[in-house]
Amino acid sequence: MRVYKDKTYKSILAEAKNDIGDEVIKVEGSLVHNALSALAYEIEKLYIQMDYIIEQSHASTADIKHLEMIALDRAIIRKSATNAYVKAEFNVAVPIGSRYSLKGYNYKAVEVINDNLHQYKMIVEETGTGPNSLRGDLIPIDYVEGLESAKVTELLVAGDDEESKESLYKRYIESFTSQSFAGNIAAYKEKFATIQGIGGAKIYPIWKGAGTVKAVLISSDYTAVSDYLINQIRSEAVPAKGSGYGWVPIGHDLTIESVKEVVINVSTQITYATGYSSSNLSEKIKEKIKEYLKDIAQTWKDGDEHTEAIIYISRLEAVILDVQGVLDVNNTTLNKNSGNLTLHSDEIPKLGEVGLK
């Protein structure tokens, strides 16, 4: 945004010279020219700074630093990066605080989940989304007597990256269009958005009669929410049903559930370019399909309780055609059906098997 883009050194200098009578020598190298030239240069810098101030004063053009300050006026705080929490199983009891590693990330035992099964809640010491999808064997950093096996088995709470400028701007704009009051849909969505590991919610008011509310949640990595986190949220929202404690409005009967993942098995026939085959393109094709399904999951929270996700075969084939080496795609089926697949409003897709003919 350049409001003063015409205010350049040359234009400022020309205007200043025009304000002086012709009886004064103003040619380049003259005393007047040199004096005005230095002044024009400094004034140009002021106009540049004024343009910058104007740009940073508007949420749509501000950089992330200034957008944070603008959003604060609406009591909106940029979300920080958070740590993921996972469940790990060991063959023996391990000390709380003992540390392990997996694929470059460090894990620390913070809580016992099941004493008999040696299951522990582990925090990933590094923040961000990187370790959310990791499963497998842990390598001990600290010595633990009798330890023979240690394995990450489940993501409990997804780690988040620092909120992007686009996400913060979207929340800022939504604060003008969606007013939250105690117990309305916007208030519930706003509350769930503040909980670590939650990426969004659909709210169903009066779903089982007066006073009943159902919230269906999606993880911040756009997968189903773990039972551990669902139970944790329930205990904070309604510590004791009918007690009036917790953050659920008095008189509301809140049901909290996770979005359901529907496994999508894809089968398709592909014509490859010379030098290409399923052996060297299958992983790229699977990744493209996975990205398409994840895009659908990411938009799930933007719909209402009636919005159903549709997996279009034409769009799926289009993303496969984007892979270099693929010439044609046909005879595509989703879960053995040749038509588009419509999911329930509480469902998101999860990639299953991919068959390439």
Image (cartoon, helix red, strand yellow):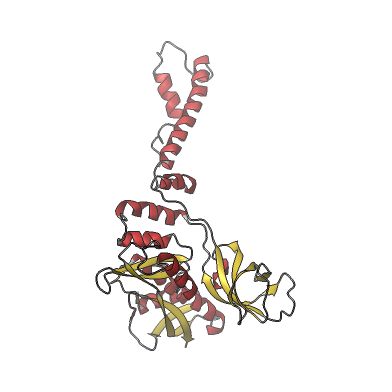
Q: Is residue 68 left or right of residue 87?
A: left
Residue at 44 percent of width and 47 percent of height: 67
Q: Is residue 124 visible?
A: yes
Q: Position of residue 324 (x, y in %)?
A: 50, 74
Q: Is residue 29 left or right of residue 97?
A: left
Q: Position of residue 287 (x, y in %)?
A: 50, 75
Total numbered labels placed on residues in the image: 0
Q: Is residue 338 above or below residue 186?
A: below
Q: Position of residue 79 (x, y in %)?
A: 48, 56
Q: Is residue 173 above or below residue 357?
A: above
- Looking at the picture, tell me which residue is in the foreground, 123 or 213: 213
Q: Position of residue 177 (x, y in %)?
A: 30, 54
Q: Is residue 69 left or right of residue 123?
A: left
Residue at 42 percent of width and 21 percent of height: 16
Q: Is residue 355 above or below residue 27?
A: below
- Looking at the picture, tell me which residue is in the foreground, 234 or 155: 234
Q: Is residue 122 above or below residue 12?
A: below
Instruction: Point out the image quarter for the N terminus.
Output: top left
